[in-house]
Amino acid sequence: MSVSNTGTGYRRKQHTGTLRLGKVMDIFEAQPLLESSRKALNDTQATQVVVEGSQTERLDLSALQILLALQRDLKATDRSFRLEGLAENLTTALAAKGITF
């Protein structure tokens, strides 16, 4: 598994890929998140990708754009995307902006 300094990384078990988010997902973590997202997208053995955000305390626009692009691209290849464990305050803020996963 490829993991950045803050814990962002991707791995697969059977047909489920897991992309783990770090504590702070901001512009400084955009490149590791993009690389992990590309690994998830290119892993055609994964029929679904779960984004695990239980450790995430902050999610900025750069990270959000990468996750939304991953969701779009997985859907285009008939694979599923699911976000799990994101703190309630983050999901509430996203929902208030009309963003749901």
Image: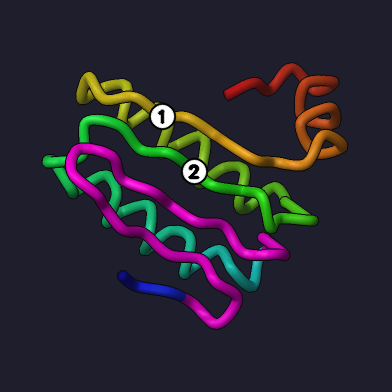
Left or right of residue 3, residue 38 in this image: left
Residue 94 % position (x, y): 76, 29
Residue 68 % position (x, y): 51, 34
Label placed on residue 98 = none
**Residue at horizontal 22 percent and vertical 19 percent from the top:** 78
How many angstroms separate mark 1 from mark 2 (CA)?
8 Å
Q: Quadrant of the C terminus?
A: top right
Query: Which residue type carries mark 1?
Result: Phe
**Between 35 and 43, which is closer to the camera in this rendering?**
43
- Look at the picture and state if 24 lies above or below 62: below
Q: Residue furthest bottom?
A: 5
Query: Which residue type carries mark 2?
Result: Val
**Between 87 and 35, which is closer to the camera in this rendering?**
87
Assign a secondary structure to mark 2: strand
Q: Quadrant of the N terminus?
A: bottom left
Left or right of residue 87, residue 41 in this image: left
**Residue at horizontal 84 percent and vertical 27 percent from the top:** 92
**Between 58 and 55, which is closer to the camera in this rendering?**
55
Q: Which residues are magenta?
A: 4-26
Magenta stretch containing residue 17, yes or no?
Answer: yes
Q: Residue furthest front?
A: 14
Does the CB distance between marks 1 and 2 fall below 8 Å?
yes
State the residue position of label 2. 51
State the residue position of label 1. 81
Residue 80 % position (x, y): 34, 24
Q: Residues within 10 Å of mark 1 (few under 14, many from 20)?
A: many
Q: Residues within 10 Å of mark 2 (few under 14, many from 20)?
A: many
**Residue at horizontal 80 percent and vertical 23 percent from the top:** 97
Q: Earlier in the sequence, mark 1 or mark 2?
A: 2
